[in-house]
Image: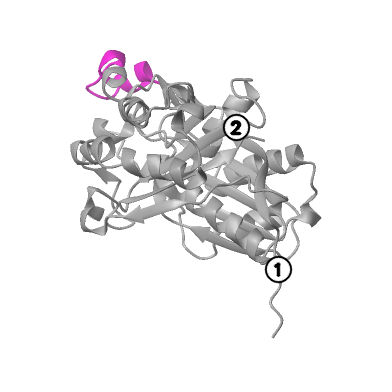
Amino acid sequence: MKISQGAPGAKILAFGHYQPSNVVTNDDLAKTLDTNDEWIQSRVGIKERRIAPPSETEIDLAVQAGGKALAASGLSSADIDLVIVATCTLETQIPNAAGRVAARLGIDAPGAFDVNTACSGFCYALAVANDAIRAGSATNVLVIGTEKFSPWLDWNDRATSVIFADGAGAAVVGPSDTPGIGPVVWGSDGDRSDAIIIKDRNSFLHQEGQTVFRWATTALHPVARQACERAGVDPADLAAFVPHQANLRIIEAIARKIGADNAVIARDIVLAGNTSAASIPMALSRMIERGEVRSGGLALLFGFGAGLTYAGQVIEIP
């Protein structure tokens, strides 16, 4: 049996993102909820978020973000042979998102599958793409995080409806002579999986906010530091730290504890809300678009959330 050899490394060629046009501010929510702008900002750091109309699905969001990433990469749809979509908000489980997104983008007969680890999903999917290219199972991979949380929220529940939002982010990953994606550090705590849960299709998202906050601010910074160590990178040398956009206080606590003193910290949550698997690629794509980070710099991506799951890796910014 002949075993195929893959590339020496893999790297991200380009990012893309997409948000629905409908902006919902804290003041908008205060019209129907017992809340206000100060209350929301002081607890989660969010000023506004984007909510898709009923006619715009999570597949539509993914196609927009994936198309932008593909265009920015300089590759064509014919160059992509694997599509991975990270999402936890599909209306139906069959068919999967990846095959439908690939068809809409004109990608012919790729490998196509979904990943559901909720808020850590993009980092899980990116790790699989990296390994597939290095093993020779794929040449170029389109990785997308897409979420439409709005149908899964009880809009009378201020504990969740002020936090979650809709959007998509994507990356094109290709072969490289040197590694541009570091080793992934990932794991889970299934004993606390009910901290964030949707019981069934007739239920809304429920989150034990204080449980998740304590876990994120006390248990996760050693994992983030380990991702740097496995990549041989000192956190002080990071150009950017792009964690899951869960809560501004969580983001700043983890950044402080890992010592990312010189890094630009992603704070996309302020204007985008929590978009779960979409939050990391969307945040970094927007940072690149605004010129906040330089090409070739190192960024730590770190996802965590429902499951409870976590994953992170250091990447070279395209």
Q: How many numbered badges does the structure rendering display?
A: 2
Which amino acid lies under the numbered mark 2 shown in the image of this protein? Ser
In the image shown, does 312 or 115 lie closer to the viewer?
312
Residue 87, visible in the rendered structure: no
* Lateral position of residue 230 relative to residue 29, left or right: right
Q: Quadrant of the N terminus?
A: bottom right
Q: Give above or below for 76 relative to 265.
A: below
Q: Residues within 10 Å of mark 2 (few under 14, many from 20)?
A: many
Q: Name the element at disc 2.
A: helix
Q: Name the element at disc 1.
A: loop
Query: Which residues lie in the magenta part?
Result: 25-39
Image x and y of residue 4, in percent:
71, 72
Identify residue for label 2: 285
At x 72% / y 66%, what residue is drawn? Answer: 109
Image x and y of residue 260, in percent:
42, 27
* Lateral position of residue 310 relative to residue 64, left or right: left
Q: Give above or below for 292 relative to 187.
A: above
Which amino acid lies under the numbered mark 1 shown in the image of this protein? Gln
- Sequence-first disc among 2 and 1: 1
Identify residue for label 1: 5
Residue 122, visible in the rendered structure: yes
In the image shown, does 113 or 304 lie closer to the viewer?
304
In reply to whether residue 245 is colored magenta, the answer given is no
